[in-house]
Amino acid sequence: MYSEEYQKVEVSVMYENAIIIREKLRKKKTGEGILMQELGRGVRMNGLHWNMEDGAIVDWHKHEAEQFGYVIKGGFKIWFEEEEYEIHEGDCYFVPPNVNHKFIALGETEAIDLFNPIKEDIPKEIE
């Protein structure tokens, strides 16, 4: 599945931090009612953790990375282009590369997103 060279790389060399303790990660405010933590990155993917207040909006955007998300608590209204969906705790979603999408939190929401390839344009912290 992976090249021989990839398989031989030690975990500590391959990943900046192979084990992440989320409680030790800094929370960044990236929007009104939105806190994000960068969980880290591997060779081909990175992860983000989100805490969002009810009604918080991640407005229309798109990126080259494919996105997988899992709702830990709460839920989202999600739009992919013109299609609207509603998901809740325990549900997940896939966002194809370069597809416009938008999220609105339904209740106090917690979620994790994974991106492949690595998503470099991470939301910036705001005051």
Image: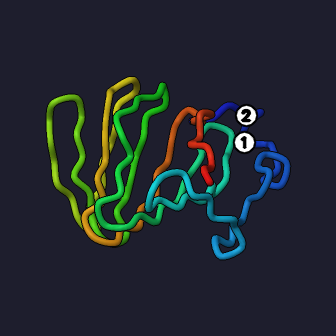
Q: Which mark is residue 107?
A: none
Instruction: Give residue 112's position: percent from left, percent from top.
Output: 46, 58
Q: Which mark is residue 7?
A: 1
Q: Name the secondary structure under disc 1.
A: helix
Question: Which residue appears at 40% of the width and 27% of the height?
Answer: 97
Question: Splitting the image into 4 quarters, where does residue 62 fall?
Answer: top left
Q: Horizontally, is 34 left or right of 25 in the view?
A: left
Task: Check contact, mark 1 vs mark 2: CB within 8 A.
Answer: yes
In the depicted view, which residue is nearer to us: 51 or 18? Answer: 51
Question: Splitting the image into 4 quarters, where does residue 99 fall?
Answer: top left
Q: Is residue 47 above or below residue 107?
A: above
Question: Which residue appears at 56% of the width and 51% of the height?
Answer: 47
Instruction: Give residue 23's position: percent from left, percent from top.
Output: 65, 76
Give the CA separation, mark 1 to mark 2. Answer: 5 Å
Q: Horizontally, is 81 left or right of 12 in the view?
A: left
In the depicted view, which residue is nearer to us: 68 or 56? Answer: 56
Q: Is residue 106 above or below residue 125?
A: below
The residue identified by callout 2 is 4
Q: Horizontally, is 50 left or right of 5 in the view?
A: left
Question: Which residue appears at 60% of the width and 46% of the height?
Answer: 46
Instruction: Give residue 123's position: percent from left, percent from top.
Output: 56, 43
Q: Name the secondary structure under disc 2.
A: helix
Going by the numbered disc 1, the residue's amino acid type is: Gln
* Classed neighbour count for the residue bearing mark 1: other residues with Cα under 10 Å, few (<14), some (14–19), many (≥20): few
